[in-house]
């Protein structure tokens, strides 16, 4: 099980959290003015990087706050967590093939 | 004022805990009690944007909201439990049926003009008090927290998942150790049964104590 560092509560077990997908993905400002393809792209398509990935989590059984996490999706190494609106930590980004 | 008729019933009432209650642990490693009804209020306010909130709360409750994550403030009769950066659970030991309404009104009046929310959640939650030398070891089997004495100290509050899926708030009161466990009332019997199961093997005996 992962130990996830909630930016409010500190390190907690993974089963207290729920996953929220890719982070820093801006919602289209005026959804009714964009094409279906662009909307589908926003809703369904994620980078799904094999490597350093910026993702959203919610501490659903703890403080119930959303936050961002930088995690290596291959090694599960966690590079840091930061609150919504904060800048991500500087990370030596990696991708694997 | 006319006397209020109350139809309140604890979700643990079917277990008949009061009938089995002993006055002390008598050598048991862990004892479980159901405390009397309490007033539980959910308070949401952004303290950095509403600077008057702390003073208003203090005027009514005589305590200040804890700003450190996972801690509580208060005394034997009243607590404020940190639930999130802008959310607290106010606990008041007042078992009168109309107490929830009264305290909600008092707090709302004091907070007038401050952007916040006060909601009476007294009847949404059940409370179990767990005490005894084996309490940490028994709870450790039910929650994914580090229950070591150095990692969970009196005055701390932690929300976590209990057993398979049930959310609980644990408030550690003293070094006995004594924990107050708050859970949704529909999970109360589950939490009680799960604790009893966890106690098996962890300690000599499981006692039912007076609330
Ligand atoms: Zn948290």
Image (cartoon, coloured by chain):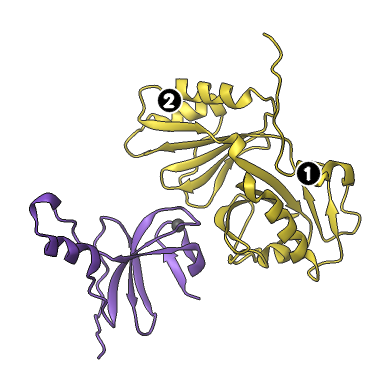
Report x, y in % for residue A12.
50, 65
- Determine whether the beta carbon of the residue marked 1 sits less than 8 angstroms from the nearest atom of ligand 1: no
* Of the image marks 2 and 1, the number of the one nearer the N terminus: 1
Q: Residue at x 26, y 89 (%)?
A: A96
Which of B137/B166 is in front?
A: B166
Residue highlighted by disc 2: B111
Report x, y in % for residue B195.
73, 59
Q: In the picture shown, does residue B170 fall above or below A76?
A: above
Badge 2 density bin: few <14, some 14–19, many ≥20, Cα 10 Å: many
Q: Marks 2 and 1, Cα distance to the nearest angstrom?
A: 39 Å
Query: Element type at marker 1?
Result: helix
Chain ID for yellow: B
In the picture, measured across the screen, residue A22 lies left or right of residue B182, that is left
Q: Quadrant of ligand 1?
A: bottom left
Residue highlighted by disc 1: B14
Could you tell me which chain the residue with mark 1 belongs to?
B
Quarter assignment of residue B13: top right
Image quadrant holding the C terminus of chain A, namely bottom left
Q: Residue furthest bottom?
A: A97
Can residue A59 be seen at all in this image of the molecule? yes
Q: Residue at x 41, y 47 (%)?
A: B85
Marks 2 & 1, CB-CB < 8 Å contact: no
Report x, y in % for residue A49.
26, 79
Quarter assignment of residue B48: top left
Q: Colour of chain A?
A: purple
Q: Residue at x 24, y 71 (%)?
A: A46
In the picture, measured across the screen, residue B45 lies left or right of residue B49, that is right
Q: In the picture shown, does residue B33 fall above or below A83?
A: above
Can residue A29 be seen at all in this image of the molecule? no
């Amino acid at each position: 099980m992962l130990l996830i560092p909630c930016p409010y509560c500190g390190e907690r077990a993974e089963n207290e959290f729920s996953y929220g997908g890719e982070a820093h993905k801006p919602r289209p400002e005026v959804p009714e003015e964009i094409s279906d393809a662009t909307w589908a792209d926003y809703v369904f398509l994620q980078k799904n990087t094999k490597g350093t990935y910026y993702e959203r989590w919610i501490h659903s059984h703890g403080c119930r706050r959303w936050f961002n996490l930088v995690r290596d999706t291959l090694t599960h190494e966690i590079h840091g967590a930061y609150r919504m609106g904060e800048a991500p930590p500087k990370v030596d980004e990696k991708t694997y093939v | 004022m006319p006397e209020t008729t109350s139809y309140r019933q604890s979700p643990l009432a079917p277990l008949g805990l009061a009938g089995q209650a002993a006055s002390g642990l008598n050598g048991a490693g862990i004892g479980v009690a159901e405390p009397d009804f309490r007033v539980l209020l959910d308070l949401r306010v952004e303290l950095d944007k509403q600077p008057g909130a702390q003073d208003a709360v203090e005027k009514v409750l005589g305590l200040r909201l804890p700003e450190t994550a996972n801690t509580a403030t208060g005394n034997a009769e009243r607590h404020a439990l940190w639930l999130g950066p802008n959310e607290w659970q106010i606990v008041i030991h007042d078992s009168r049926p109309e107490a929830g309404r009264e305290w909600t009104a008092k707090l709302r009046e004091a907070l007038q003009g401050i952007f916040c929310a006060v909601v009476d959640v007294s009847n949404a939650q059940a409370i179990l008090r767990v005490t005894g030398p084996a309490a940490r070891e028994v709870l450790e089997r039910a929650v994914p927290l580090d229950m070591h004495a150095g990692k969970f100290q009196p005055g701390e509050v932690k929300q976590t998942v209990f057993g398979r899926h049930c959310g609980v708030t644990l408030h550690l009161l003293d070094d006995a150790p004594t924990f107050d466990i708050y859970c949704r009332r529909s999970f109360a019997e589950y939490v009680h049964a799960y604790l009893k199961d966890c106690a098996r093997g962890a300690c000599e005996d499981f006692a039912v104590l007076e609330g």
